Amino acid sequence: MRLFLLPISTRRSLIYCQRLNNQISSETTYIDKLTTRASNTWLRWEKAEKGWRTGWQKKVTHYGNKLFETIPHEEWGLKSIPPLSTRRKDAELKGKNEVEVIFPGSVIAEDKVKMALQEFAGDQRQGFHTKWMWATIIGMPLSAPAALIPIVPNIPFFYMVFRAWSHWRARSGSRHIDFLLDNRLLKFATSSKLQLAYEAGGLDVSMKELDNDVEKIREKTPQVISKRDAETDMERMLLTQSNSGLISELMDVPELEEHLQRAIKQVEKALRAEKELQEEKRDLDNVNKEVGPKR
């Protein structure tokens, strides 16, 4: 499998695991099959036509997708990492399943990549998912009364089940990273394609433009890389929505685009909230300074 460590801002990164085709076929578990079946059902509900029999399915998926967008991108990323089974552990220890970490070396140094992975694998992260996994399990019985509603299934209960599974899967992914770090089984590799995608950030260029005029794009964007210093600069975005499709296309990982879009959206929202809070605090301090002398 391959891990992608992609900086979204100067202080926050996305992690995503790409499972290779031969591993997918040989490592599919019963839980994976259930997950695939649930995903297919959800997709079928999304495509349901309007009507009194199936209209509720479309509404459920509409509001459900809005709820899914609020789930932190870190959780989605960790869920993409397969749980550490006994067979997988033995294969990785024996070097049969190589685990590569792909990152843009001109944007983030290898030691910073290791630090980011340690945060994803840390006790705080695992404890967070353990806490909320049990909280949602405890909350399942509280959703039982919703089963009395005719025709419509017990949506609150199924959402609780999904969130419990989601936290369990994210904790499993975190533990897998921890295992790989402890046993030094990760192979770190920079990607020139990723670096180029970051250099093209904000220019809204296509694959065709990259292929035809790489040097021209690099001439336009030398400042993009040179100013990236997470320790001295204020936190700022390194990717925009226009980058998500370009990166997924360059790396030939179509499913990565959705994860990038979600992460970029969430980080942008967080930075806007922090900026508004700082402005409110600054305004309050100015008011206090003006009022203070009069007293």
Image (cartoon, grey):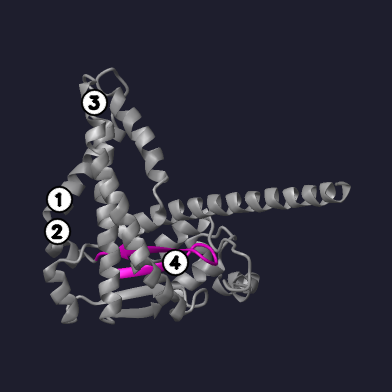
> What element does badge 2 sit on?
loop
Residue 185: image location, x then y, percent: 27, 80
Mark 4 = which residue? 6
Q: Are marks 3 and 4 in contact (CB under 8 Å)?
A: no
Which of the marked residues, 1 or 4, is nearer the chain's N terminus? 4
CB contact under 8 Å: marks 1 and 2? yes
Query: Can you identify the residue that label 2 sits on?
Result: 28
Q: Is residue 58 left or right of residue 165?
A: right
Query: Of the residues shown, which amino acid type is indicated by label 4?
Result: Leu
What segment carries the magenta color?
1-19
Q: Give whichever of discs 3 and 2 has the lower sequence position.
A: 2
Q: Secondary structure at mark 3?
A: helix
Callout 1 amino acid: Lys
**Mark 2 Cα-neighbour bin, 10 Å: few <14, some 14–19, many ≥20:** few
Q: Residue at position x 12%, y 64% from top?
A: 26
Magenta part mainly helix, strand or loop? strand
Depth-wise, is mark 3 or mark 4 nearer the camera? 3
Name the spot of residue 130 as percent of width and height, x first.
28, 56
Q: Residues within 10 Å of mark 1 (few under 14, many from 20)?
A: few
Disc 1 marks which residue?
Answer: 33
Residue located 46% across and 73% down the image: 104
